[in-house]
Amino acid sequence: MAHSHDSTEPLLGNGRPNTARLLISCADRRGIVAAVSRFLFEHGANILDADQHSTDPSGGTFFMRMEFHLEGLDLGRRELEHAFATTVAEQFAMEWRIAYASRPKRVALLVSREEHCLLDLLWRWRSGDLDAEIGLVVSNHRDAERDVESFGVPFVHVPVRRESKAQAEGEILGHLNGPHGPFELIVLARYMQILSGDFLAAASAPLINIHHSFLPAFAGADPYRRASERGVKIIGATAHYVTEELDAGPIIEQDVAHVSHRDSVADLVRIGRDIERTVLARAVARHLADRVLVHENKTVVF
Ligand SMILES: Nc1nc2c(c(=O)[nH]1)N[C@@H](CN(C=O)c1ccc(C(=O)N[C@@H](CCC(=O)O)C(=O)O)cc1)CN2
């Protein structure tokens, strides 16, 4: 549908909510909520959900998420965005974007050998609990091939060897930006290859990784063995956006579980699997709902 001003139905023909999400960050000052609310009101939008946060009311950074109904809007999408840019965003020097809920976001998954996070996301997607369109799984191993294809999702095997990583990354990018794509989110569901800065720059979408430790503790490879050697009493998992620096990207979601001296490394791995898949699913769901704002390597999760 080219223009939302003729979206007079609460639900679209595909049964999806006829809503949009406006995300804003800017220097905090008085009048921002009033200006945004007034703008939406004057253009016929009905605000369904509003949340905001200021890091410091005396001059910090202001974050806002407004979800609003497009029914009754007097402008099409392009006109609405232009009007907001010129009448509100410029006034407050906002960084902002509007995301539309008219269709699910297309998602690609990358995995190595551990399948629990991958299968969890596929199960949630198949049951309708994950608002996404999973369009491709890429792996450097073939272990998951049959399971993935049983979900009707294309599977591509791209082996990665240390001496030819750049070539493998180019092949993966070819699939992500090729006929299966484009994608709006790439999820590393226990993908165990460090991605180059060139790859991240060329990737067409943000990437979310699940790291199997409570970052910043035990970043890098083999965290459960290192945690066991340290004698930890808590293990955890961290979902974060992927940056060139390993396991250092903005954290989206974390959780933990208690362990003891009675737990072997294998026990930590087993206990950790449930944490990892739950944390990753929460992080992906919040990203898909446009509930995550990134600022200075941290996130605001509405
Ligand atoms: N640029 C980034 N790439 C990746 C990130 C990241 O944050 N930034 N997260 C990792 C996932 N990960 C931990 O969560 C991780 C994966 C792999 C390794 C590692 O040392 N891999 C070795 C090869 C290991 C093997 O071949 O089995 C390597 O790539 O040299 C550490 C941490 C995903 N990528």
Image (cartoon, rainbow, N blue to C red):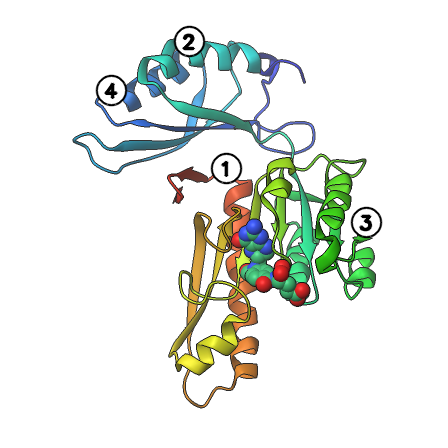
Q: Are marks 3 and 4 in contact (CB under 8 Å)?
A: no
Q: Is residue 274 above or below residue 270?
A: above
Q: Amino acid at mark 4?
A: Gly
State if disc 4 and disc 1 touch (CB < 8 Å). Answer: no
| Between marks 1 and 2 in the image, the one whose residue lies nearer the viewer | 2
**Badge number at residue 290:** 1
Left or right: residue 275 versus residue 24 is: right
Residue at 74%, 59% (x, y): give it: 161
Which badge, 1 or 4, is on the more N-terminal residue? Answer: 4
**Mark 1 or mark 3, which has the lower sequence index?**
3
Label 2 amino acid?
Thr
Which residue corresponds to mark 2?
86
Q: Position of residue 82 (x, y in %)?
A: 49, 11
The residue labelled by disc 4 is: 31
Of the residues under marks 3 and 2, which one precedes in the sequence?
2
Asked whether mark 3 lies closer than 8 Å to ligand 1, one says no
Of residues 241 and 81, the one drawn nearer to the viewer in this rendering: 241
Residue type (three-letter) at the residue carrying disc 3: Pro
Q: Nearer the viewer, mark 3 or mark 4?
A: 3
Say which of 96 and 197 sits in front: 197
